[in-house]
Amino acid sequence: MTHTGFTLWLTGMSGAGKSTISDKIIERLRTAGAKVELLDGDIVRTNLSQGLGFSREDRDTNIRRIGFVSELLSRNGVIVVVAAISPYRETREEVKAKIGNFVEVFVNCPVEVLAARDVKGLYKKALAGEVGNFTGISDPYEPPLHPDVEVRTDRETVDESLDRIWAELRRRGFISQ
Ligand code: ADP
């Protein structure tokens, strides 16, 4: 498979499915012979953004750093997959404008379903008021108004979501097969 460098940016609330979908799409891209790198918000926060908190300013700094690395990699032909809550629309638009080859995926799932899934046990705590600045509960999440792809993980299987993202990458000419 041939491909250009681009950034596939997955935004959505905690537990929506960003990591799950990222892992699978990366596996599929690597199997096809592509050069791919993952920037996962949780992992970035333990190194590149160590010490940052969850204020708007710190969240924006984190996203700008991820955007900066994504640009360096994608302009060198690498496919970058970003899995980060990235709650602020304006900041996502800013990194999108800087990077250029950018596909925004809105990983959407209703908060009731997220609270029921409670993958990391954080929704229960956030709803009980034990976690401050929790996106979607005690902190804002601004959904994309015009995402390139919107996946509804409460209604589709992971493979269905994956196929729709893949189709968009092909449609845009970023991947050849
Ligand atoms: P995030 O990275 O957005 O915090 P995770 O990928 O860690 O979310 O968790 C999402 C959870 O939802 C996983 O347990 C996953 O198995 C489940 N899930 C159910 N349906 C889907 C789907 N269509 N896409 C992605 N995840 C799904």
Image (tube, rainbow, N blue to C red):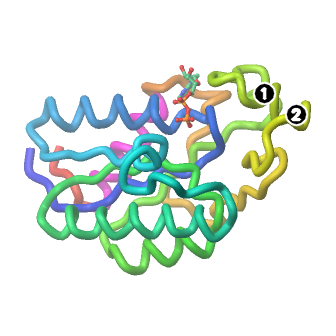
Q: Are marks 1 and 2 in contact (CB under 8 Å)?
A: yes
The answer to whether 157 appears left or right of 35 in the picture is right
| C-alpha gap between disc 1 and disc 2 | 9 Å
- Residue drawn at x 91%, y 31% is 128
Disc 2 is placed on an element classified as helix
Judging depth in this view, the residue of 72 and 102 nearest the camera is 72
What residue type is disc 1 on?
Ala
Quarter of the C terminus within the rendering: top left
Report the span colored magenta: 160-172
Ligand 1 falls in which quarter?
top right
Kindly give the residue lying farthest to the front in the view shown: 51
Query: Residue 15, located in which quarter of the rendered image?
Result: top right
Any magenta on residue 164? yes
Rendering quarter of residue 71: bottom left
- Give the overall secondary structure of the magenta segment: helix
Q: Earlier in the sequence, mark 1 or mark 2?
A: 1
Residue 115, which numbered label? 1
- Say few, some or many: other residues with alpha carbon within 10 Å of mark 1 (under 14 / 14 to 19 / 20 or more): some
Residue assigned mark 2: 127
Image-based side of 132 in relation to 158, left or right: right
In the displayed structure, 74 sits above or below 13; it is below
The amino acid at mark 2 is Leu
Horizontal and vertical percent position of residue 115: 78, 27
The residue at the point 41 percent across, 49 percent down is: 44
Asked if the magenta segment contains residue 156, the reply would be no
State the image coordinates of residue 119 (x, y, percent, origin top left): 63, 22
